[in-house]
Image (spheres, coloured by chain):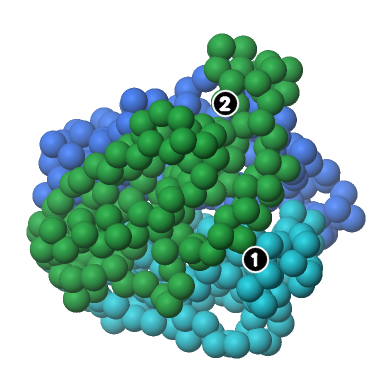
Chain colours: A cyan, B blue, C green
Amino acid sequence: MRSFRKELSLHVKARMSFVNITPQVAAAVAESGVQEGLCLVNSMHITSSVFINDDERGLHEDYARWLEQLAPFDPSPERYHHNRTGEDNGDAHHKRQIMGREVVVAITAGKLDFGTWEQIFYGEFDGRRSKRVLIKIIGE
Amino acid sequence: MRSFRKELSLHVKARMSFVNITPQVAAAVAESGVQEGLCLVNSMHITSSVFINDDERGLHEDYARWLEQLAPFDPSPERYHHNRTGEDNGDAHHKRQIMGREVVVAITAGKLDFGTWEQIFYGEFDGRRSKRVLIKIIGE
Amino acid sequence: MRSFRKELSLHVKARMSFVNITPQVAAAVAESGVQEGLCLVNSMHITSSVFINDDERGLHEDYARWLEQLAPFDPSPERYHHNRTGEDNGDAHHKRQIMGREVVVAITAGKLDFGTWEQIFYGEFDGRRSKRVLIKIIGE
């Protein structure tokens, strides 16, 4: 069994944004030399997500608006008790639960085994600082 | 290490519906010959889900109603900018994020290692055409 | 390839509550002897979740309030058709979908490969009885 580990570093300038990290994950799969296996990609932070969907700008606008409705940004400690800690990112911890922490993708014949439109995104909900994404690959 | 790959093909006639695919996944596990490992099951599309819950008709009615409240079908490009592309399925991209893309299930002693009520479902949110589900198994 | 399986047993006295199970999962990883691999942790029930977020009391209060808004407890069969079965836990099946069934965590150098604040939680939405969590580890 082979295993491979790589961290990506991201610095998103907006509070909320979506970044296509498929090329970096595909490069890690190639670098790993794994032909058949599984590739885990997860945010190492609890106010951001890794998810798979479409690389379409209108959709990302829709996601941002929808997540803001489901869990509005509000720095006060009334809406989010979490903000009693002095943080202002209670909303980001909620948005991240909707979009998910991680994806697991099959590796087949040395490549990410994807449907036609699948792309991997990093979803940032509390940006303007450096964050990390973990790629862990196991297989043969 | 063994690996095994299989695609399922689904054609759901309704726009939204839930299909129990546990028998097909169990058959793939048996076919793989893997005794101890992990089984990834994911939608290869970005307007449908794979998730685990109860095989109970009332619950599925509840899910459909609830998802329609959280992300209503609306072909106009006002609610979903994604529909500016000419698509009418912006809602389906949102419903899929709530229900998830994939499940990873343990394989123990050659079988899906499930709790009493766990069943694997394909959740369709933009049906009336053929879709694919990927099963990838690794283990020994 | 090594594989390792362990069940945790939980009995939460409240209907809804969050329990940090990171120490038990870390102990299972140590017991497995796996140095490089993947660790699946999933609820074996369909009215509870396993997820990763912050161990902060205010945040857990926020999650409970938010989930109650998204899928309110209501034992009547009008809101949740699932409750026509005689159950009163229709809401719990919805809350669990928001928070997720499972996490997959990388194992690196014999330990859970975590970001600074990542902690694993069991999320109970229909407590007051015994439930099980499955830990499955594969690797080398």
For the residues labelled 2 and 1, the Cα–Cα distance comes to 27 Å
Q: In this view, does A88 lie above or below A54?
A: below
Work out which quarter of the rendered image holds the N terminus of chain A and state it: bottom left
Q: Which percent across, then down, holds residue A56?
A: 68, 66
For badge 2, the amino acid type reads: Asn
Q: In this view, does A135 lie to the left or right of A43?
A: left
* Label annotation for residue C89: 2
Pinpoint the chain carrying mark 1: A
Residue A22 seen in this snapshot: no
Residue placed under numbered mark 1 in the picture: A82
Q: Which percent across, then down, holds residue B126?
A: 65, 40
Q: In this view, does B133 lie to the left or right of A130?
A: left
Q: Is residue C48 above or below residue C103?
A: above
Work out which quarter of the rendered image holds the C terminus of chain A and state it: bottom left
Q: Which percent across, then down, holds residue B128?
A: 64, 33
Residue C33 seen in this snapshot: yes
Q: Residue at x 38, y 36 (%)?
A: C11
For badge 1, the amino acid type reads: His
Between C95 and B45, the residue placed more toward the observer is: C95
* Label annotation for residue B78: none
Between C101 and B133, the residue placed more toward the observer is: C101
Numbered disc 1: secondary structure: helix
Q: Residue at x 83, y 44 (%)?
A: B74
Q: Nearer the viewer, mark 2 or mark 1?
A: 1
Image quadrant where residue B127 sits = top right
